[in-house]
Image: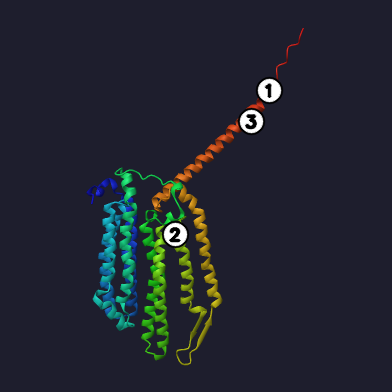
């Protein structure tokens, strides 16, 4: 580790303040306000004291962890990507978030209070589901460091700038080379896909099962079984989608290595929609004297057709972005480099526009001079004596 990367010359208070504000809202302000609103509601409704005591303990934890995470966010944002200083503060904050959430369980007392006042809910099972995307958030810090390390060192002048790759020496299968990928982008998209297609649906299923189990009605056993089946499908389909999402985010736009997993993801998503949509038919007749049948297959098919249009999008993305990626020398899809390329393209476009305007002005001026010369009276020729 280079201690010099903690130097003040790399420090940006403005960037640090932006990241600190985001951390303060996410880990301090919003949770604290929610718990405060909960305490006010309990006081107005004369709610149970044990719940109020629990919320006060949680408020204390929110203050402690929120302030620390805000400070870590400030120092993380203040240092540039690819530096050891940013990596150290970023990895510390990511690990501390896991400890923060686990501490809110209060050694099982949170679960006990919920069981007494509402229904039995396995919070540790929900925490395990939270742990996987939180772990990916930790790995994202490693990915960000690996992606931006070389650009950071090039900017510092420590190593030579990497030469652009010659397009003539490439074949289409070279798109799958690992050096074109971004670990951070891949992990980020895999994490969001895992949350959207696995974690959130499973948490909803856990909450529904906990609510149904509190009814103590034997007839809902078949529905509980259906929820278990849906949960199994969510895992079997969602995990491969998260793996494909990693490669989709890992490789840049315009590459075959991105387009192929993206199209496969759309196909799996169609089946995921069909499963979670129960094939377009919802039948509920588990409880006596209650029968409900709903046919929404047409709406479900319409949603699937709209989702299938993403295949067209990814084909167009490949065709439109590939020339740009090729002209740039097949770089990684990093935000800073992409921004620099966009800025260079903008300047080049402005220069071409200015050159065209200048050429038009010169052409117009030449026409005016020619016109003025034509309008001037010609001197009369001398008459021969």
Indicate which disc, 2 or 3, sits on the residue closer to the N terminus. Answer: 2
Marks 2 and 3 in Cβ contact (< 8 Å): no
Q: Is residue 237 above or below residue 90?
A: below
Q: Residue at x 39, y 72 (%)?
A: 198
Q: On the image, numbered disc 3 is attached to which residue? A: 367
Say which element carries label 3.
helix
Specify whether residue 182 is in view. Answer: yes
What colouring does the structure picture have?
Answer: rainbow
Marks 3/1: CA–CA distance:
14 Å
x%, y% of residue 35? 32, 71
Marks 2 and 1 in Cβ contact (< 8 Å): no
Say which element carries label 2.
helix
Question: How many C-alpha atoms fall within 10 Å of the one at disc 3: few (<14), some, or many (≥20)?
Answer: few
Q: Residue at x 36, y 85 (%)?
A: 213
Q: What is the residue that sits farthest to the right in this orientation?
A: 385
Q: On the image, numbered disc 2 is attached to which residue? A: 258
Q: On the image, numbered disc 1 is attached to which residue? A: 376
């Amino acid at each position: 580790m280079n201690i010099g990367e903690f130097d003040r010359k790399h420090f940006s208070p403005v960037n640090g303040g932006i990241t600190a504000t985001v951390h303060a809202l996410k880990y301090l302000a919003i949770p604290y306000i929610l718990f405060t609103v909960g305490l006010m509601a309990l006081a107005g409704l004369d709610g149970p004291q044990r719940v109020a005591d629990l919320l006060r303990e949680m408020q204390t934890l929110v203050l402690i962890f929120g302030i620390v995470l805000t400070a870590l966010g400030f120092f993380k944002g203040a240092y540039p990507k690819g530096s050891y200083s940013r990596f150290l503060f970023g990895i510390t904050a990511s690990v501390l978030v896991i400890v923060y959430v686990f501490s809110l369980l209060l050694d099982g007392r949170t679960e006990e209070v919920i069981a007494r006042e509402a229904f039995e809910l396995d919070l540790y099972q929900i925490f395990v589901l939270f742990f996987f995307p939180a772990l990916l958030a930790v790995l994202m810090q490693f990915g960000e460091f690996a992606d931006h390390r070389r650009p950071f060192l090039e900017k510092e002048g420590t190593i030579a700038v990497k030469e652009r790759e010659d397009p003539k020496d490439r074949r289409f299968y070279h798109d799958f080379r690992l050096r074109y990928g971004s670990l951070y982008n891949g992990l980020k998209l895999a994490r969001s896909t895992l949350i959207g297609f696995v974690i959130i649906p499973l948490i909803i299923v856990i909450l529904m099962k906990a609510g149904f189990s509190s009814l103590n009605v034997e007839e809902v056993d078949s529905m509980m079984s259906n929820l278990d089946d849906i949960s199994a499908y969510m895992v079997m389909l969602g995990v491969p989608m998260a793996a494909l999402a990693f490669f989709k985010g890992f490789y840049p736009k315009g590459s075959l290595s991105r387009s192929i997993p993206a199209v496969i993801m759309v196909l799996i998503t169609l089946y995921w929609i069909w499963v979670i949509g129960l094939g377009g038919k919802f039948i509920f007749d588990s409880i006596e004297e209650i029968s409900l049948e709903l046919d929404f297959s047409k709406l479900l098919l319409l949603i699937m057709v709209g989702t299938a249009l993403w295949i067209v999008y990814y084909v167009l993305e490949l065709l439109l972005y590939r020339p740009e990626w090729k002209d740039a020398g097949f770089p990684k899809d990093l935000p800073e480099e992409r921004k620099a390329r966009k800025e260079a393209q903008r300047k080049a476009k402005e220069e071409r526009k200015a050159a065209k305007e200048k050429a038009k002005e010169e052409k117009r001026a030449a026409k005016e001079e020619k016109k003025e010369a034509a309008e001037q009276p010609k001197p009369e020729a001398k008459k021969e004596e």
